[in-house]
Amino acid sequence: MEDISPNEVFTKDMKRRFVKSFLGMLVLKFIQNEPIWGYKILKKTEVLYQIKLRHGALYPLLNALEANGFIKSKQELKKGRIRKVYKITSKGTQFLKTYQDFLKQQL
């Protein structure tokens, strides 16, 4: 059995806490980087943070972000399938920038 260092344990725990606490900001950042659909957000979160995000957590969040005007969605045909693709709005971009500025001040 492989020994896991305390640093690796702490890092894994920090990633989990970070994703749980800042999921909305992470999703906005993913959407800011590229138009993206829900399944790709799930996979990206898993690859980058080793967190399996559930559909029941992601889709209500996407709906709330859209209801608040931070993102907009559009159905598009991708690889023969219709997908709901999310794009960030100018309001979402400003919100994300304000949030990042706030974090910089705090750190």
Image: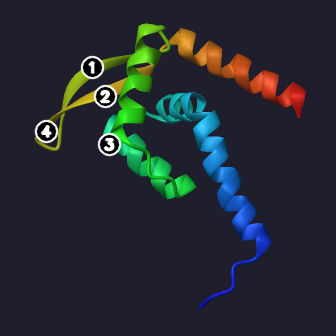
| SS class, disc 1 | strand
- Direction from residue 45 to residue 40 in the image, left or right: left
Q: Residue at x 47, y 8 (%)?
A: 69
Q: Residue furthest left?
A: 80
Residue 74 numbered tag: 1
Residue 63 image position (x, y, % from top left): 38, 18
Q: Are marks 3 and 4 in contact (CB under 8 Å)?
A: no
Question: Which residue was labeled with disc 4?
Answer: 81
**Can you give x and y, in whole percent of width and height, for residue 90 in the image?**
54, 11
**Residue in the picture at 80% in, 28% down:** 103
Kind of residue at badge 3: Tyr
Above or below: residue 50 compared with residue 105: below
Tell me the quadrant of the picture where the C terminus can be found: top right
The image position of residue 55, as x and y in percent, is 34, 38
Residue type pointed to by label 2? Val
Identified by mark 4, the residue type is: Arg
For mark 4, does the 10 Å Cα neighbourhood hold few (<14), some (14 to 19), or many (20 or more) residues?
few
Which label's residue is closer to the chain start, 2 or 1? Answer: 1
Q: Residue at x 58, y 18 (%)?
A: 93
- Separation of disc 3 and disc 4 at Cα? 13 Å
Query: Disc 3 versus disc 2: distance between alpha carbons?
Result: 10 Å
Q: Earlier in the sequence, mark 1 or mark 4?
A: 1
State the residue position of label 3.
39
Query: What element does badge 2 sit on?
Result: strand
- Determine contact: label 2, label 1, CB under 8 Å: yes
> As drawn, which residue projects farthest toward the bottom?
1
Which numbered circle lies on residue 85? 2
Question: Is residue 22 shown above or below 89?
Answer: below
Q: Residues within 10 Å of mark 1 (few under 14, many from 20)?
A: few
Closest to the camera, between mark 1 and mark 3, is: 3
Among numbered discs 3 and 2, the one appearing first in the sequence: 3
Q: Nearer the viewer, mark 3 or mark 2?
A: 3
